[in-house]
Image (spheres, rainbow, N blue to C red):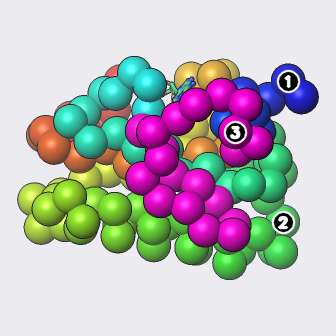
Amino acid sequence: MSCLFCRIIAGEIPATKVAETEQFIAFRDITPQAPLHVLIVPRKHISTLNDLTPSDDALVGAMTREAAAIAKAHGYDTSGYRTVFNCNQDAGQAVFHIHLHLLAGRSLAWPPG
Ligand code: AMP
Ligand code: ZN
């Protein structure tokens, strides 16, 4: 299995999990870009946002609500946080298994670089 995040999901590569459900897992980003940087990753391999189908709508909705729940659990619901899906080269997607970034704990610039 060559996909890094599929290997994390399979338990072959360690990660610091913060949440998991039947549909997805959430773990700390190995190179955090903010005091809280979590990746919410579906157990199902989906390469990019371009590959989503209507059958994934509930999955993506649940991942988004999990990001909000993790932000709230860490006390950032009022101060704020950012959620990001990077898609393909211009967005800097490095791992081709979709993942929702949750960033919080500092003021985040807009527009992003
Ligand atoms: P992206 O650029 O959106 O594809 O983001 C990939 C993210 O995965 C980056 O923020 C990396 O720091 C993160 N990452 C890469 N390898 C690992 C790993 N083994 N455990 C946790 N996060 C990782
Ligand atoms: Zn994968």
Disc number for residue 2 = 1
| Disc nearest the viewer among 1 and 3 | 3
Q: CA distance from mark 2 to mark 1?
A: 23 Å
Q: Quadrant of residue 7?
A: top right
Quarter the C terminus occupies: top left
Q: Which residues are magenta?
A: 9-28
Residue 64 location (% of width, % of height): 49, 66
Closer to us: 28 or 16: 16
Q: Quadrant of residue 94?
A: top right
Q: Is residue 50 visible?
A: no
Q: Tag 3: residue type?
A: Gly
Secondary structure beneath label 1: loop
**Residue at image point 77% right, 69% down:** 56
Residue 97 location (% of width, % of height): 73, 39
Quarter the N terminus occupies: top right
First-in-chain label (1 vs 3): 1
The residue that disc 2 covers is: 53
Residue 93 horizontal side relative to residue 71, left or right: right
The residue that disc 3 covers is: 11
Tell whether label 1 touches label 2 (CB within 8 Å): no
Above/below status of 68 relative to 51:
below
Q: Is residue 17 magenta?
A: yes
